């Protein structure tokens, strides 16, 4: 996505649960290809059709206060990102 002559990368998620493996991949992608605040994650609530776009760097800063959980089916670790939180800008 191009915005104000700057290329932005957007990952669209249908849930606020981010797997630890995915976050590691996003960080690696950010280090290789992104500058400044150009990597965004769009959380889409399917039921209410609301979208919350949060910068990857803001998510990384916030997850240190969020407990790691595990999916029951595959035992993968994930963070449940509070997308209703107004502290994200």
Image (spheres, helix red, strand yellow):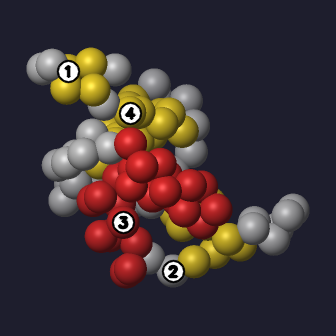
Nearest to viewer (mark 2 / mark 4): 4
For label 3, the residue is 60
Q: Disc 4 to disc 1, how far (Cα)?
A: 10 Å
Crowding at dot 2, Cα within 10 Å, few <14 / some 14-19 / many 20+, comes out as few
For label 2, the residue is 67
Q: Disc 3 to disc 4, how far (Cα)?
A: 16 Å
Q: Disc 2 to disc 4, how far (Cα)?
A: 27 Å
The secondary element bearing badge 4 is classed as: strand
Numbered mark located on residue 3 in the image: 1
Marked residue nearer the N-terminal end (4 or 1): 1
Relative depth, front residue between 70 and 84: 70
The secondary element bearing badge 1 is classed as: strand
Marked residue nearer the N-terminal end (3 or 4): 4
Numbered mark located on residue 9 in the image: 4
**Residue 49 shows in this picture:** yes
At which x and y percent is residue 46? Answer: 55, 29
């Amino acid at each position: 996505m191009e915005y104000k002559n700057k290329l932005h990368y957007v990952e669209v998620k249908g849930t606020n649960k981010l797997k630890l493996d995915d976050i590691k991949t996003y960080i690696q992608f950010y280090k290789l290809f992104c500058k400044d605040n150009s990597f965004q994650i769009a959380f889409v609530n399917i039921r209410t059709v609301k979208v919350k776009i949060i910068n990857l760097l803001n998510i990384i800063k916030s997850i240190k206060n969020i407990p790691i959980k595990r999916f029951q089916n595959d035992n993968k670790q994930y963070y449940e990102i509070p997308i209703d939180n107004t502290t994200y800008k």
